[in-house]
Amino acid sequence: MNLQEWRQQRQSEEEALLPSGLTVTLRRVSVLDLAEQGKIPQTLMPQLDMFIKSGAKASSLEMIAKMGELITLTCRAALTGPEGLDAAELPFTDRLAVFTWLNEDASKVQSFRLIKEGTLAA
């Protein structure tokens, strides 16, 4: 894949059918991209930190409730259609489905090193 193809892929949008039955248009965004761009409010930083430390797994209902704002924020950044839809209007299961879709690539990340012989010199 060349640079132009890679950029087009990053900017592409996909239609998705949410668990509630609504069809939406989404673009890929990352929570870490949003954090790097300063788009995550300071009030949500502790929740993001907790989420990252837990391995991106919600282990309790309390944690799910705390992560709701972060999930909604991420969904807002990903939703491109239908026009006028606010992510907060979506049921939590829809927002969680979008969030899971956005993060599915992170679960597939493997070591970038192709050769795993020996160790690196200091």
Image (spheres, rainbow, N blue to C red):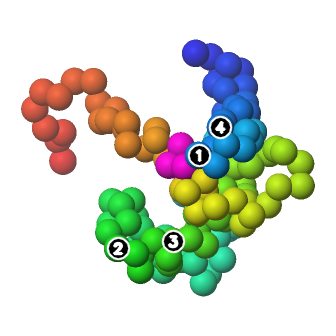
Which residue sits at x=37%, y=38%? 109
Mark 4 near mark 1, Cβ–Cβ under 8 Å? no
Quadrant location of the N terminus in the rendered image: top right
Q: Tell me which amino acid carries mark 1.
A: Pro
Kindly give the residue lying farthest to the bottom in the view shown.
43
Secondary structure at numbered mark 1: loop
Write down the residue under mark 3: 67
Kindly give the residue lying farthest to the front in the view shown.
21
Using the image as rendered, state which of residue 95 and residue 52 is in the foreground. Answer: 95
Q: Can residue 59 be spotted in the picture?
A: yes
Distance in Å between CA atoms under marks 3 and 1: 19 Å
Q: Tell me which amino acid carries mark 4.
A: Leu
Q: Position of residue 91 (x, y in %)?
A: 64, 61
Distance in Å between CA atoms under marks 4 and 1: 7 Å
Q: Quadrant of residue 5?
A: top right
Distance in Å between CA atoms under marks 4 and 3: 23 Å
**Label disc, if present, on residue 19 of the rendered structure:** 1
Q: Position of residue 58 (x, y in %)?
A: 38, 66
Residue 99 lies in the magenta-colored region: yes
Q: Tell me: 79 left or right of 3.
A: right
Using the image as rendered, state which of residue 27 and residue 65 is in the foreground. Answer: 65
Which residue sits at x=61%, y=57%? 95
**Label disc, if present, on residue 60 of the rendered structure:** 2
Mark 2 near mark 4, Cβ–Cβ under 8 Å? no
Secondary structure at numbered mark 4: strand
Q: Position of residue 30 (x, y in %)?
A: 58, 51
Residues drawn in magenta: 97-101
Q: Can residue 29 be spotted in the picture?
A: no
Q: Tell me which amino acid carries mark 3.
A: Met
Write down the residue under mark 4: 17
Secondary structure at numbered mark 3: helix
